[in-house]
Amino acid sequence: MFKINENFLELQDSYLFSTIAKKVAEFQKNNPDKKIIKLGIGDVTRPIAPAVVQAMSKAVMEMGKPETFRGYGPEQGYDFLRNKIAEFDYKNRGINIEPDEIFVSDGAKCDCGNIGDILGNDNIVAITDPVYPVYLDTNVMAGRSGKYNSEKNIYENIIYIPATADNNFVPELPKKVPDMIYLCFPNNPTGTTLTKPELKKWVDYAKENKSLILFDSAYEAFISDEDVPHSIYEIDGAKDVAIEFRSFSKTAGFTGVRCAYAVVPKNLKGYTKDGKEVYLHGLWNRRHGTKFNGVSYPVQRAAEAVYSKEGQKQIKENIKYYMNNAKIIKEGLEKAGFTVYGGTNAPYIWLKVPEGLTSWEFFDKLLNEANVVGTPGVGFGPSGEGYFRLTAFGTKENTEEAIERIKNIV
Ligand code: PLP
């Protein structure tokens, strides 16, 4: 008799977005004439930049000719892309990350989950709350979460670090020391960020306690304020305690193309049970080479073109477009009397739901009365209750119309 991985049975039934999809489908079935505007799921809508499409097409043509055909590539990514990442995303910001510390992959989601392969299953995990659900669910699958407590909507072994309006969305250092700490800034879902001194506290804490920080900066390209760090490696000492995850998904519209990367510094060490130090770089290299075949050549050429002069100009125009939507949402909702957070350094707007409503009740109200879809805050963790997420990834026209409709129902 074979056994299943019973950790999967601890996962909570319906993943947030499938519940939303079901509710929306039912509403549409009952109201076929209503035009629903979706500002819920964080998928992009702008097409890929022309310079990027051109580079990808050229690479596809190369694959069709015997002189330029390529088979398996290096699992860690082609040098042409790793060099560009090291130069543009790090060296140009005064950070020394070597190209061979960069592991190109097919997604930050996959990396955030897969990294657990090289980490002990008895590690204590901390997540900020609310946050991108992948950190939690992948640790439930790995058996690090313990049992689910349905009354409190928490797992017994996970340390939840609240980030709410009460602490200005700056999570406090936990008293019980975690081994693995997931930080996501700019944050999904709150759209809030940390300053360098705030982030430094986490780096110092991790150093002092021999914890590992898993830093997700999938939204760094949306930062506009000068004092907000784009990378955790802007903080002294972070290379000793942190792995960073980045993605081309939101930066360059690659959600359907798939390219991302993880940075594992060569001097970053973990520990065996008896306290022996082991370099994580070697472990991740081995894991990546064994379980991953590399990102396809045309896609890596496309990602390379993101760093070209034209590519940079074009992706920045798209980011500007989305951030203008964020402004429309933020200012529109504020005028309508809502308390609103985020939306200046991230494409997410986090609003306080009206008194007396839960975040799912507000979801239903918005869907039924304004035909607008957002995401209930509680879906991102218990501290998300009472909040609601709207994304700036729609079209400008839909965003404007959605805000007008919301204004009319309050
Ligand atoms: N990290 C965060 C915080 C996200 O919000 C998302 C996508 O929504 C991802 C990672 C996923 O990135 P990718 O498309 O590269 O898997």
Image: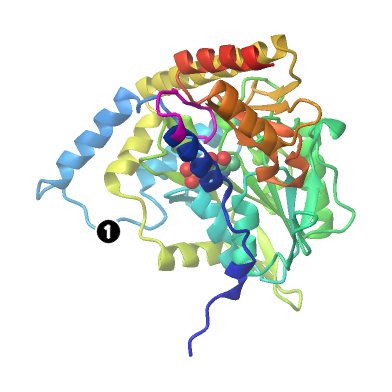
- State the residue in front, 191 or 400: 400
Q: Label 1 sits on what residue type?
A: Tyr
Question: Is residue 101 among the parts visible in the rendering?
Answer: no
Secondary structure under the numbered disc 1 in the rendered image: loop
Instruction: Look at the picture and state if 55 lies above or below 7.
Output: above
Tell me where residue 25 sits by quadrant: top left
Q: How is the image coloured?
A: rainbow
Q: Quadrant of the C terminus?
A: top right
Q: Is residue 93 magenta?
A: no
Q: Can you identify the residue that label 1 sits on?
A: 72
User: Residue farthest to the left?
Assistant: 66
**For the point 44% across and 17% down, which residue is it?**
317
Task: From the viewer's perspective, tell me whether residue 21 is left or right of residue 295.
Answer: right
- Neighbour class for label 1 at 10 Å: few (<14), some, many (≥20)? few
Residue 244 placed where, x, y %? 60, 46
Task: From the viewer's perspective, tell me whether residue 58 is left or right of residue 257.
Answer: left
- State the residue in front, 394 or 110: 394
User: Residue farthest to the front?
Assistant: 30
Per the picture, the main secondary structure of the magenta-coloured stretch is loop
- State the residue in front, 332 or 322: 332
Magenta span: 30-42
**For the point 48% across and 90% down, which residue is it?**
1
Instruction: Look at the picture and state if 149 lies above or below 311.
Output: below
Residue 199 placed where, x, y %? 76, 38
**Number of marks:** 1
**For the point 64% across and 62% down, which residue is it?**
139
- State the residue in front, 364 or 271: 364
Question: Is residue 222 among the parts visible in the rendering?
Answer: yes
